[in-house]
């Protein structure tokens, strides 16, 4: 069985993913895959440099994420151009890993952490979608603190994603992460038991 794990930026998906893997779930992290596909020597990195210029590369040839972020987070056209390069490569790796896990570990739960699951139209890949939720105001404060952003920068990043309330509405499984870690863990345990995964 597989589930897609999503939420908004700074809602605590990594915390929930950790709680699930501690119980025996297999994790496929699309943020990690996104980093893998832009490593030196990967075709996607070359295409990014062609599209956005050599300024998005560090001196050693690796990706300058901060520079690229400044370009794409402020401009929807540029963001779409980046997604057109990276999304097909990320999706191909995701599908391969899901197939490998299904073949090798058919009785285990595979959790695929997809930050932009709804935005990317990936729901059909998953049996259910789990959304990690915190109210938008709290999401904004966490993002500012975590990434040391100005209010304006944080607002821009939230605006680049589907509103968290809409994700909450679409969820098959909702995890409210606005309380304590213990409260979140209790929700994960209830889900785990309810799925007969213990």
Image (cartoon, rainbow, N blue to C red):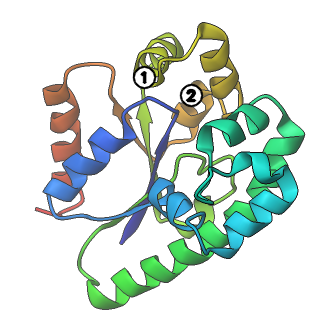
**How busy is the neighbourhood of tag 2: few (under 14 within 10 Å), some, or many (20 plus)?**
many
User: In the image, is residue 38 above or below residue 81?
Assistant: below
Q: Quadrant of the C terminus?
A: bottom left
User: In the image, is residue 4 above or below residue 44?
Assistant: above
Q: Residue at x 51, y 66 (%)?
A: 36
Residues 173 and 117: in front is 117
What's the CA distance linking mark 1 and mark 2? 8 Å
**Going by the picture, which residue comes out furthest to the left?**
198
Residue 177, quarter of the rendered image: top left
Q: Which residue is mark 2?
A: 164
User: In the image, is residue 73 above or below residue 13?
Assistant: above
Q: Residue at x 70, y 25 (%)?
A: 159
**How busy is the neighbourhood of tag 1: few (under 14 within 10 Å), some, or many (20 plus)?**
many
Q: Position of residue 115 (x, y in %)?
A: 53, 46
Q: Quadrant of the N terminus?
A: bottom left
**Going by the picture, which residue comes out furthest to the front?**
59
Q: Which mark is residue 81?
A: none
**Going by the picture, which residue comes out furthest to the right?**
77
Q: Residue at x 57, y 41 (%)?
A: 170
Q: Are marks 1 and 2 in contact (CB under 8 Å)?
A: yes
N-terminal label among 1 and 2: 1
Q: Position of residue 65 (x, y in %)?
A: 61, 44
Q: Which residue is mark 1?
A: 134
Question: Relative to residue 128, is residue 75 drawn left or right?
Answer: right
Classify mark 1: helix, strand or loop. Answer: loop
Q: Position of residue 24 (x, y in %)?
A: 16, 64
């Amino acid at each position: 069985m597989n589930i897609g794990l999503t939420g908004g930026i700074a809602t605590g998906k990594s915390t929930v993913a950790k709680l699930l893997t501690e119980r025996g779930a297999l994790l496929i992290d699309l943020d990690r895959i996104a980093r893998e596909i832009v490593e030196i020597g990967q075709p996607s990195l070359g295409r990014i440099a062609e599209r956005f210029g050599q300024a998005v590369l560090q001196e050693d040839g690796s990706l300058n994420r901060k520079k690229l972020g400044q370009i794409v987070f402020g401009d929807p056209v540029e963001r779409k151009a980046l997604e057109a390069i990276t999304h097909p490569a990320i999706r191909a790796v995701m599908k391969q890993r899901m197939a490998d896990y299904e073949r090798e570990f058919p009785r285990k739960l595979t959790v695929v952490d997809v930050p932009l699951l709804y935005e990317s139209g990936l729901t059909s890949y998953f049996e259910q979608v789990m959304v990690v939720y915190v109210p938008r105001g709290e999401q904004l404060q966490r993002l500012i603190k975590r990434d040391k952003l100005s209010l304006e920068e944080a607002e821009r990043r939230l605006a680049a994603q589907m509103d968290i309330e809409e994700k909450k509405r679409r969820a098959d499984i909702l995890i409210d992460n606005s309380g304590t870690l213990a409260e979140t863990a209790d929700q994960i345990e209830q889900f785990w038991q309810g799925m007969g995964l213990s």
